[in-house]
Structures are given as structure tokens and as C-alpha cells.
Image (spheres, rainbow, N blue to C red):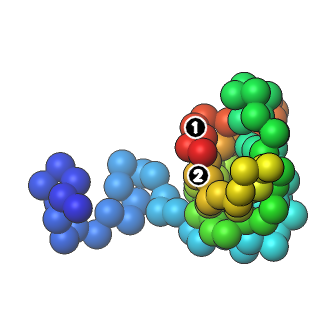
Amino acid sequence: MILWGLQNANLQGLCGIPTAKKADVTDINVIEMAKFSVDKYNEEAGTKLVFMKVIACASWNLGVVTVYALLIQTQDSKGTYIDKAVAVDVTIIGKKLLWYKH
């Protein structure tokens, strides 16, 4: 993928933003964020997805904000799915779901 013409550039630290780190899918914070994301999506979409497990996660720690990009295995009465979510945990405010793709 070419990003602003920087095809082979090292993007680490671009604009002062640290690169994402692969997060441990068994970490309690990652699991809690994934469960939160599924629950929030259910609330907003009127679905009844059940959290099964975190398949993969990348996270960015930006000081008081941690951003999580998640691949989550979910299930409902129709089948099993791999959903994608982006959520943040802000130290003072709490968790917020930014995007969810079922």
C-alpha cells in the first residue's frame, strides 16, 4: 500500500505517533476491551452477539489514551463470526467504541 507516496518509508514515529504494538490476546485489558466492544455494538445495533475470544490485537499507548484495534470471534444463533473493532480507553473518561464491523 502506498501511503502519501511513502511506499517503502519507515513510518515508525511518523508525526510523533508511536507505532502499534502487538498485544497479548490473553491480557485482561485486551479481553475487557473486546467484551466492551461487543456489548456496545449489541446495544447500538440491537444484536445478540456473544463474545468468544480475541483473535488478534494491536494497541497504541498515547499517554492517557490507549487505542485498540481488535479481531474478535463472536457467535449468535446464526453462526460464528470474526468481527473487527477499534476502541479507546481514556484514563479519565473510560472506554469508547469508535468503529465496529460485523
Quadrant that contains the C terminus: top right
Q: Residue at x 46, y 52 (%)?
A: 17
Secondary-structure class at tag 2: strand
Foreground pick, 51 / 99: 51
Residue 84 relative to residue 53: left or right: left
Q: Where does residue 13 sit, x and y in percent of width and height?
A: 40, 60
Q: Quadrant of residue 57?
A: bottom right
Callouts 1 and 2 close, C-beta under 8 Å: yes
- Disc 1 residue type (three-letter): Trp
Residue 37 relative to residue 50: left or right: left
Q: Quadrant of residue 96?
A: top right
- Disc 2 residue type (three-letter): Lys
Q: Residue at x 47, y 63 (%)?
A: 19
Secondary-structure class at tag 1: strand
* Crowding at mark 2 (Cα within 10 Å: few <14, some 14-19, many 20+): many
Q: CA distance from mark 1 to mark 2?
A: 8 Å
Q: Residue at x 18, y 58 (%)?
A: 2
Q: Where does residue 23 sit, x and y in percent of width and height?
A: 67, 70
Q: Is residue 33 visible?
A: no
Q: Which mark is first along the chain, 2 or 1?
A: 2
* Crowding at mark 1 (Cα within 10 Å: few <14, some 14-19, many 20+): few
Q: Where does residue 78 sit, x and y in percent of width and height?
A: 72, 50
Quadrant that contains the N terminus: bottom left
Residue 99's tag is: 1
Q: Is residue 84 above or below residue 56?
A: above
Residue 22 relative to residue 10: left or right: right
Residue under pointer 2: 84
